Amino acid sequence: MGKLIGIDLGTTNSCVAVLENGKPNVIPTRQGHRTLPSVVAFTDEGNEIVGVTALRQAVTNPQRTIYGIKRLIGRKANDPSLQRWKSCVPYEITSAPNGDAWVSTRDGDYSPPEISAIVLQEIKAIAEDYLGAPVTEAVVTVPAYFNDNQRQATKDAGAIAGLNIKHILNEPTAAALGYGVDKSKDQCLAIFDLGGGTFDITIMKTSGGVFEVLASSGDTFLGGNDFDQALMEHVIAEFQKEHGIELRKDPVALQRLKEACETAKKELSSTTTTSINLPFITSGPTGPLHIRHDVIDRPLLEKLTQGLIDRLDAPCQQALRDAKLKVEEVDQVLLVGGMTRMPAVRRKVESTFGKVSAKDVNPDEIVAIGAATQCGIMSGDLQDVVLLDVTPHSLGVRVRDERMSFVIEKNTTIPTSEKKLFATTRDNQDHVDIQVYQGENEQVWSNTNLGQFSLGDLPLMPAGKVNVEVTFLLDADGVLKVTARELTTGKAASVKMTPSSGLGQGQVDRLAAERSGGQRAKS
């Protein structure tokens, strides 16, 4: 078996690390950077470019430069959370035949796993250059609040890239492992992870090398991109008020403004004022027009993003309730993700948890370091660490009146197995359809459908007299297998749940074969 690498596949940036001599080390890119922009672009010559090089051509070729693809992975095109995002990105988001959100360029239509695979393939190549040996296996992190569709789509991306994803690890859990909490001290940690596209909060206890997740909550569409967007919309509205021109219709202007607003946001984490000046942003009846905001101050940014900051509170409170802990019982807060550098976010954390966060964490690298630590646990190189993670969402089946009957509750430690008994609802019912869902709503249609299967040839008896035992087996990777057995005859049926959306296995295999024989993307 080759070297196992740990990958933080981020919305904005990605990072890769490997365990060497018992310690996790970040692998630098070819340019010497410790993170890789999660950006893919297509050139006029038909080449793929990744990372810093792709980022450089974003302004000149915005409609063929794809960023933030993690926000689309495992989602439907009609997802309400995508609508604002569509209006502020220069590339086109379209609906695949099965309703999934894809991106469309003049080079073709691409699924999110395909774009993510291009990033992963570049990370694989960087690791191989560093290690001087082939890399075929990885631990990849995902937001703790990702659902099954999003997790499976991430695994598909790995397969397309030629990587066998040995384990899907929740990002906050990885951060705790990477932090290397003092194993001799019992602690309760809150890992507050606000990245480019997602927000997670995880409550965890550590004791003698055992890392036990108590609860996770979050928002899979809340992150730095939304803070950029809030500032963008302010500037666009001011420009339209002054000149009567809608900049959202100009992809080049939109990309220039996006980059300027992101830069301004970052600068306001360390300074109190900055500026946004974009000459020749577009043309009007009187000639060239410019954006001139000589003073953008921190109070303005905080006012524009107050609603986003307020949204951080509910998941934190939910996680504490689910963990059955009072805020005073949390010993330490770890900040993860670039957005935790924003002073207003740090103040929110301090007001929520009543304590200052740990200062000795690099929020851009800690998740990849934790993923490499997990590699060491899996390989046996680190034998004094035990990880107990949880499932972030409840799992159950559809029952009468379109209701959800929960079989595995959220925040249950995995791996786990649970059984539940159901009875037929009609006289002489000869089969049952087992429809499996993921989510917290008692109304089944508000949850995510994971798939279904049938158990037939049931004894023909009055309603309620035939009992079917349904077993849910959830492994440490979050992969679900469901078995149904009729108790009288012992007849059984089972299925390994695959997402109700996303790429089929045939598509994944075809894309993997194409990429293995194709030209490697340039970074």
Image (cartoon, rainbow, N blue to C red):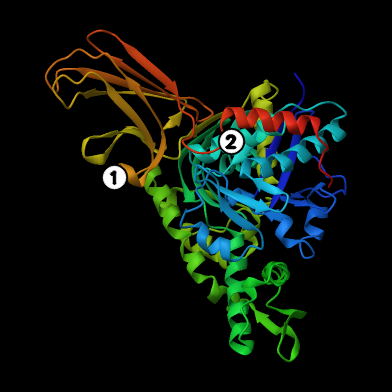
Residue 272 location (% of width, % of height): 68, 77
Residue density around tag 2, few if under 14, some if 14–19, many if 20 or more, within 10 Å = many
Secondary structure of the residue carrying tag 1 is: loop
Closer to us: 192 or 34: 34
Q: Is residue 66 above or below residue 465?
A: below
Residue 251 location (% of width, % of height): 69, 67
Closer to us: 324 or 318: 318
Give the residue displayed 56% in from the left and 73% down from the top: 302
Residue type at mark 1 is: Gln
Q: What's the distance in space between the residues labelled 2 and 1, CA to CA?
A: 29 Å
* The label number, if any, that marks residue 443 in the structure image: 1
Q: Residue furthest bottom?
A: 286
Closer to us: 297 or 283: 283
Label located before the other in sequence (2 or 1): 2
Give the residue displayed 77% in from the left and 25% down from the top: 3
Q: Residue furthest left?
A: 462
Residue 498 relative to residue 72: left or right: left
Report which quarter residue 473 is drawn in: top left
* The label number, if any, that marks residue 339 in the structure image: none
> Do tag 2 and tag 1 residues touch (Cβ < 8 Å)?
no
Give the residue displayed 45% in from the left and 59% down from the top: 313
Residue 189 relative to residue 10: left or right: left
Secondary structure of the residue carrying tag 2 is: strand
Residue 444 relative to residue 270: left or right: left
Residue density around tag 1, few if under 14, some if 14–19, many if 20 or more, within 10 Å = some
Residue type at mark 2 is: Leu
Circle 2 is placed at which residue position?
169
